[in-house]
Amino acid sequence: MEGRAFVVLLVIASLIVLAENTDHKNAIEIYSLHVDSTVTSRFAHTVITSRLVNKVNESREAIFEVELPKTAFITNFSMSIDGETYPGTIKEKASAQEQYDIAVSHGQSAGLVKTTGRKLEQFHVSVNVASDSKVTFELIYEELLKRQLGKYELLFKVRPKQLVKHFQIDVHIFEPQGINFLETDSTFMTNELTEALTKVQNETKAHILFKPTIGQQKKSPELEETLLDGDFIIRYDVKRSVSAGDIQIVNGYFVHYFAPSEMPTFPKNVIFVVDQSGSMSGRKIEQTRDALLKILEDLRPEDHFSLITFNSLVTEWKNTLLQATGQNVESAKRYVKTVMARGGTDINNALLTAANTLDKASYAEILQAHSISMIILLTDGQPTVGVQDVEIIQQNIQKAIKGKYVLYCLGFGFDVSYKFLEKMALDNGGIARRIYEDSDSDLQLQGFYQEVATPILKDIEIQYPENSILELTQNSFKLFFDGSEIVVAGRIDNELDVLPVEIQAQSHTSNLIFKEEANVREKEKVFQHQKYIFGNFIERLWAYLTIQQLLEKSISAQEEQQKNLQVARALELSIKYSFVTPLTSMVVTKPDDQQKLHLANKPTESDNEKSRVTGFSVRSDGYFDVSLARDYVHRAPKTGQRAILFDTPEHSPDIFRTVQTTAQLLTNEYPHFLFQLPRQNDVICLNIDGQPQAYINLISDPDKGVSVTGKLGRNRNHFVLFEITNLDPHVQLRVSKEGTVLSYGGHTTKLPWTKSASSTVQGLKIAVEKERSLTMSASANITIKITFIKSPNRFLGLYFMDTDHFSDKASGLLGQFYFDTHLESNPGASQGEDERVLSVHGQKHRVTRKNKKDYRQESATGIISCWSLHITP
């Protein structure tokens, strides 16, 4: 999917009636809608122009929405009303945001861009149109098409929602290497619409025009409904030879494309590391099993492979890699069919096990000398067991892999931290990809594997004259996969007449050297007389590629200074070339109100994950739900926090602004308890309204022979004492802020927090980590951990590991949650809130997604997204 170039169109004439009147169908008429896309040497420049008219005798609101590829950069937008144009301006994101925030505080703002799908971002703007007035919207964006599985693809999602008098999609393609094949496809095409499609192609050029008349657009002669609702797709590839690739030059900038083919494939050593925690239950684990069964069948006989599944524990199919013989593949498929989802998520241990397995296979000389080793991780959640600090996990994995293997990280759904996976993958030579929860999730998994299934080159170094090429993009690559393409760009010194290139790489059978020379003047002549070449397109291609690579490098930068330099350079280029990137924003002034600002930001993949706010929800425009916030402000002093609420008098009473104070309104409190629901990945943050200095029965499980009571501190903020009783052997632990007292057989042992210590009593293990935590591991597979928090106030945090090991006889404040408990959807959820219903033995509790401080993590700034619940014992 990453290789597709999506050019996606959705223009809606949305009739928002501003005065009481009867409905007028298509009061805002789209009388012209043009999509003009020029693809020159893989670089696509797309202009979408929509012209509308208000046909009724009153003002109406016209809405312009376009869905564009996530990989594209918006370069320009403008609105023209009655001959006057209102352009957008691109600014540094920080200054644009400051201007926008001021406007937000006065209600004079609206966000323009948001993520709407796997590969799409939605650009949205609206404008008030007077009676009989016309408005023209124009949006321009650019992107470099990425070759995937041997082709480039443009996809136009067409949905104008009404018949359009002048509708056309006009695409010009110019590829100096020559066009190898070209095809079009559509999900809405009929015989009549086929007549509106023309396609002209010669050696290097192609012209595709789709221009249906009103009659051809109609579903039937009697209905004023459009057939144009679906995908219009163009696919193509270029001609290639086994050489050093193709170099193209315009106005002192060059681009070099390298995509060899018909080479032997490296044998692979691949370990699939698959999350089987409770949150993977149901459809996700079924689709994962289906995908793995198909992927195993696609392994080549010379490949070696293994499977690791993990939840709270790490399970290896085999303790080494095996050759992908028919017998071994069938054995692995039988294992995959038995994989069930339950327990927590120990990502750290699972990946360390995979790296160690590859190390052992390498030392034992099981693997072929010239082979490629990779780890493919699939997970749908945050680490909840073992090491949970994501920075420590990233460091651990990088140390274990040591650059020897490639790590690919696949995040299933939106409960994962994409930033965590992306950095870990980039640190280890791979990439991250989100797998969307949908009916084709298994196909997404298979599709990703196909992209990395055929490595044909490794250690590729592309060399140019050192003193004659300036500002070169990335020119060394770890792996090259069949069907993809390497792209390098740079600036040529004015004195250079001939551009030599040398490529060194290693194939499965030999070391390769490719050489080529490009005559600068001859190459520049290729583009001199092409009428559809847009400006200095290779220079813009170079800037586009440089910005993307700088942003990617900044993610995995080891030094803060290095990261700052990369970001600063990317920002400088974004502003110079007018690209809306994650570092810049486009500010649009609305024509019907010169104080009304719109802001177009470039969302990142991490922005797709839902942001959470403690106590209440944040809306995308910066406002909060007033009733929840007033309640939050009312409760804040009781929990040692301070919050200030500012009402905005210009607005209705259900809208207000808040200001973050010294208590850090966002994510500012530890819950009393954090616990994971059994056989699920959902975490509950529980606060109780109990009496200070009173003992509370937290859990009692007669089958497991364990019970825990706790005591709240004087101000009821947190727990200050826990007493744990284990029946076999009969051991009691009294854990306080001063330390632990262990009682067994009439003897007592003190274990202070000031030093690490451990003790074992008939298989019962007790370990104290200095000034951090106490862990008790019982023979009944019950592990209890108590964290000692010293700041801002000293208190104790309790949590259980492997919660699915408790029996159905467990009782107590926490024990009640460990069986017959599940989350349900909440149809009556408040607008803007992420709410569920927690069913506990049939009793319903309303829970809301919040961010809380995580006392389980070593870092004092650790944050957990959880379902928040308040109860009274």
Image (tube, grey):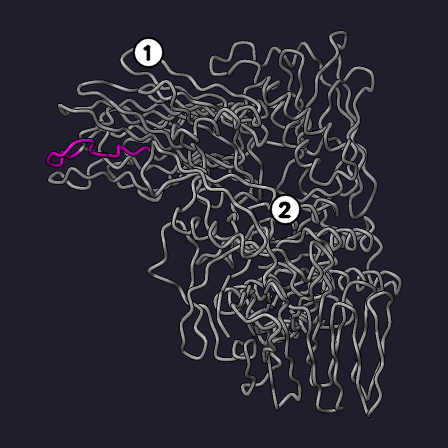
Residue in the image at 61% along x and 64% along y: 297
User: In x, y percent, where is residue 749?
Assistant: 85, 81
Q: Does residue 791 lie above or below 710 as drawn?
A: above
Q: Earlier in the sequence, mark 1 or mark 2?
A: 1
* Mark 2 lies on residue: 419
Q: Amino acid at mark 1?
A: Glu
Residue in the image at 27% along x and 28% along y: 62
Q: Does residue 332 lie above or below 45 as drawn?
A: below
Instruction: Report the side of 734 relative to 449 (left or right).
Output: right
Q: Secondary structure at mark 1?
A: strand
Q: Does residue 642 lie above or below 796 as drawn?
A: above
On the question of residue 203 being in view, the answer is: no
On the question of residue 121 being in view, the answer is: yes
Among the 4 quarters of the image, the one containing residue 340: bottom right
Q: CA distance from mark 1 to mark 2?
A: 43 Å
**Mark 2 packing: few (<14 Cα in 10 Å), some, or many (20+)?**
some
User: In x, y percent, where is residue 574?
Assistant: 59, 23
In the rendered image, the residue lying farthest to the top is 495
User: In x, y percent, where is residue 109?
Assistant: 40, 29
User: In x, y percent, where is residue 25?
Assistant: 15, 35
* Mark 1 lies on residue: 84
Among the 4 quarters of the image, the one containing residue 243: top right
Instruction: Report the side of 31 relative to 391 (left or right).
Output: left
Please state the extent of the stretch shown in magenta in the rendering.
11-25
